[in-house]
Image (spheres, helix red, strand yellow):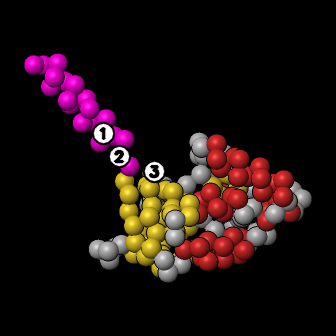
Amino acid sequence: MNTKFLLSSLMLFSALWLHAEEISGKVIKVADGDTLTILTSSKEQVRIRLASIDAPEKSQDFGNVSKKSLNSMCYGTNANVVVQDTDRYGRKVGVVYCNGIEVNLEQVERGLAWVYIKYAKEQKYFDAESRAKNKKIGIWSMNNLTPAWEFRKSHQE
């Protein structure tokens, strides 16, 4: 009897642990190439940071192009987000789908975001970045564009 209870408890715990938080809502704002805000059905505004990628800062080359790309894919549409974490700014960090497109991956594929090496775990992001580099598109069309995480460090006061 104890074995059955233990096994059942373990299975239930595993199922709960594996189930990621998912949220959905209408995209009401695109802040930059890797951050947007959705309005849920309960009228809650949730800021989302796209996981595994880092888009150019607004003041960097391709910063505005990256924002426009995310805006064209998502603004005004319903987005589904698989939440992975919450960052230090209180934003949900996750994989975002707009119109069936995984926009995190698409931003990298278009050469409009770097793979955020510190956080990315899935090979598909690195493969997409390699394809963009080989095509020399977006950020890869420039020589030595500083990755966003290094750019932020060098521009802190």
Is residue 125 found inside the magenta-colored segment of the image?
A: no
Whether 17 is among the magenta residues is yes
Q: In terms of secondary structure, where does tag 1 sit?
A: helix
The answer to whether mark 1 and mark 2 are in CB contact below 8 A is: yes
Q: Mark 1 = which residue?
A: 15
Q: Amino acid at mark 1?
A: Ala
Q: Earlier in the sequence, mark 3 or mark 1?
A: 1
Residue 19 numbered tag: 2
Q: Which residues are magenta?
A: 1-20
Give the amino acid at mark 2.
His
Q: Residues within 10 Å of mark 1 (few under 14, many from 20)?
A: few
The image position of residue 65, as x and y in percent, is: 72, 74
Note whether 150 is above or below 139 in the view shown.
above
Residue 147 against residue 126 in the figure, above or below: below
> Which residue occupies the extreme front position in the image?
100
Q: Which labelled disc corresponds to residue 84?
A: 3
Q: Secondary structure at mark 2?
A: loop
The three-letter amino acid code for the residue at tag 3 is: Gln
In the image, 101 versus 59, the foreground residue is 101
Q: Residue at x 85, y 59 (%)?
A: 136
The spot of residue 21 in percent (x, y) is 37, 53
Q: Residue furthest right?
A: 143
In this rendering, which labeled residue sits more in front, label 2 or label 3? 2
Q: Secondary structure at mark 3?
A: strand
When asked about the image quadrant of residue 147, the answer is bottom right
In what quadrant of the picture does the N terminus appear? top left
